Structure formats: C-alpha cells, structure tokens
Image: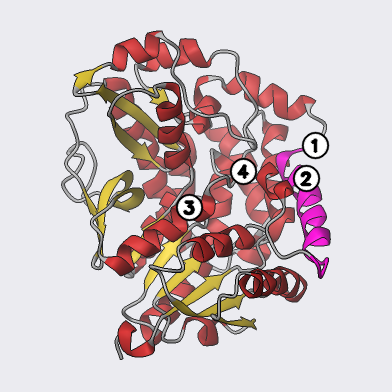
Amino acid sequence: MNMSEKQGLKIAIIGSGSTYTPELIDGFIRLRETLPVRQFMFMDIDDRKRTIVGELCIRMLQEEKMDSEAILTADLDEAVRDADYVITQIRVGKLPARILDETIPPKYGLLGQETTGIGGFMKAQRTIPVMCHIADRVKELAPEAFIINFTNPSGIITEAVMKHGFKRIIGLCNVPINMTSSVREQIPNGELTMDYVGLNHLSWIYHIEQDGRDITKEAIRQGVKSERMNNIPPSDLDREITAVAGAVYSPYLEYYYDREHKKKHNLDSGKCRGEECMEIEEQLLALYSEKTLCRKPELLNKRGGHRYSEVAVNLVHDLYNNTGNVNIVNVRNGATLDFLEPDDVVEVACAIDRDGAHPLPLRKIDNTHIKTMMETVKEYERQTVNAGLAGDRTAALRAMVVHPLMGDYTTSQKCLDEMLNANRAYLPQYKF
C-alpha cells in the first residue's frame, strides 16, 4: 500500500515522553498543508511522561483542528508497524543516567558532558543496543520507513545503526541550522552561501561568500561567530578562537578549545546541566498537565533543543515531497570527504529526495586544523561504535586514549570502570 492509498502518513515518535515532543507537533501543524499526517503514534515506556506529553499534543492538534489520529502506546511494534517515518528521540536511563555522565568524570579530572568526551561515550554505550533493537523492528514491520534520529550522540548512534545493518536512517541535530542562521543574521545583506563540514557536535563553517565574493577572512575579522546555546556555558574567547581556527565553529567545540574554563564552570556551578534539566523538565510537565494548555510553552526554550521541530519536520517534508532541498544532516560519508572512510558518518549538506539524503560536493578543505580534528575524533567515534555494538572494553579504551579530552590511559581506565559499573543495568552487551 503506497502513501496516497493510505491518505496520509503514519508518523511514529519513539521516546514521545520527551518534553521536546510538543515542539515537534507544532512543526507538523505548521506544515500540515504539504505534509498530510493521518496518524501519530506516541510511544514511550514511561507511562507518566507518555500520558502527560501525549495528551498535550492531542490538545494541540485539536486546537488547530488537525484531524490526525493520535495513539499513545508503550508497544514498540504497534508504534512502528507500517509507519512511513520513525522519529527516535530516546534517552536510555533518563536524566539520572545523564547526571552520572556529568558527575563521575570530574572525579578523575575529566569533563562531564552529555555528548562530548567520556559522558558522550557512555550515553552511546547505553543507547546503541536499544537503537539497534528499534531498527530491527522497523526493518521487519516497516521496511520502507526512514528512521529520523535525534537521539544523542546523533552521529555516533546513526553510524552504529548503519553498521548494525540498517541503512534507512538519517541523523539530525539542531546545531547546523542554528549556526548557519546565526551567520546570516550577522551578515544580513546580499546573497549568502556557506560551506559547512564536520561530525556531529564537531563542525565548522569554513567558507562564506556574499554575492559570489569570498568574505571568509573578512567575516572572521569582524567577529562573526556561532549562536550561543542555552546548554553550553559562554566563553569570552570566541572571537580569538575563531581567528585561530580560521572558521566559524560549533559551540560544542568550546569544550575542546576552552576546556579548562568549561571544566571549572561545571565545578563552580553547584549543579550539573542534567540536574538543571531535571528541574526544567518537572516544571514543563507541570505546565503540560494543565488541561487548558493547547500550545507549547515558552519555558521549553530553556532546554537546548531550539529549532528542533524545524529541523525534523523540514526533513520529513523534503523526503515525502521529493523536493531536492538542502539539509545539513548526518549521513554515510561515501566519497564526500577523502580523508575519512566511506562508512564513516559525517555531518554535511545533502540534497533530500524520496530516496534519502545525498551529500553534495564540498569545496576543497585546505584548513588542516579542521581535517586533523575530524580525523582524530572520528577514530574515537569508530571505536565507540565498536565498543557499543560488541561490549568490547578494548575498543572502549582505544576510544578513550585517542580522544583529545581524555588521552591518559590510567585515568581513562579508572573512570571507564566506574562508569560501566554505574550503568551496568543498561549495558547488556558488556560482561560484568
């Protein structure tokens, strides 16, 4: 049965108890005329959050008189069966696991962060088995569906699922659209084009043209930079670092460029970001529980997922409508970057059509700083994927010692052992 015969799309949202889900639904409402959805499946294993968030989403649909069917379920198979698009936004271990990722590493002098460094490594280890299981069920029950992955660390998870054997997956992040939009706001006149390259949470805009003229160096001299993110503490060095890097960089790169300041900020703040998010989440759930609320509240903007719905819904729109529009997404490298392996997942501009995301040719990258950082962190990502798929402690330590934010073998080993033990309930691939 094709989509036209079904008279609309079936969208499965896995991890629908996320407080970001109302923003996602807001995006589908916005594009309702060109993206017809006959059914939303709100799937989450957390009964409380699935109910609270799902009921708000239903009220939003009703308020806008959008007649899509909405079903709340804890059954993965029910959710993905015959789906056209499966949006994954899961957090294995929920926010308490994130808090461990952020509070254990500082005991060893390491950065504790959700997606970067050893915290991101551990999040990937918890998530890879679950995402591979989801992919297996989609492959059996909805073989033509695309998985749209927002689960962090997005690039690593996307690569793991591909290596597991599921190819119809595209990884997403809101950083690229925030970076490019921010640069456009700072250079408002003329026709602007940008070249973007990187890995998820390790990316740069390395070439900027205005009306066909290369203005990269001029823009850097004038202090053009990426937009601040709510979940990353600010740096006073962004202008100098941009000049040294020779490119506008992702805010997440400040964890590399300004690491000691970031570690000190985390220690001095009194609570980690995961604890802050837990407080914000409970405030949001309290708001969502109000039966008179029929739209996403402004408080949602205090989380780090600004423009999440725009990225996700635009991608689904462009896949469904076969537009050829350009989106920056996480995809298989192929021949795009000759200094990386074909099966590596990279974050680059792609043309989107009904068959998927197709990387566009990139302007030659002469910036050896960018290439060297990408090569180094990509090796960390490869080993992280190997560890997550097989429960391979040797691969885990290889990932640790090659990563710029870890490196020291003894320190990494001690921290890794504690984090593996703290997360053992979520690590079926490891032997304890």
Q: What residue sits right under mark 1 in the picture?
A: 271
* Residue 161 left/right relative to 285: left
Label 4: how many residues lie within 10 Å, few (<14), some (14-19) or many (20+)? some
User: In what element is the residue under mark 3?
Assistant: helix
- Say which label, 1 or 4, has the lower sequence index: 1
Circle number at residue 275: 2
Q: Quadrant of residue 36?
A: bottom left
- Find the distance from the CA under tag 2 to the CA under tag 1: 6 Å
In terms of sequence position, does the residue under pointer 3 or pointer 1 come before the other?
1
Q: Secondary structure at mark 4?
A: loop
Please state the horizontal and vertical placement of residue 33, each as a whole percent of the image.
42, 68
Q: Which mark is residue 310?
A: 3
The residue sitting at 64% across, 36% down in the picture is 230
| Gap in angstroms between the C-alphas marked 2 and 4 | 14 Å
Q: Position of residue 92 (x, y in %)?
A: 62, 62
| Quarter of the C terminus within the rendering | bottom right
Is there CB contact under 8 Å for labels 1 and 4?
no
Q: Is residue 387 left or right of residue 99?
A: left
For badge 3, the amino acid type reads: Glu
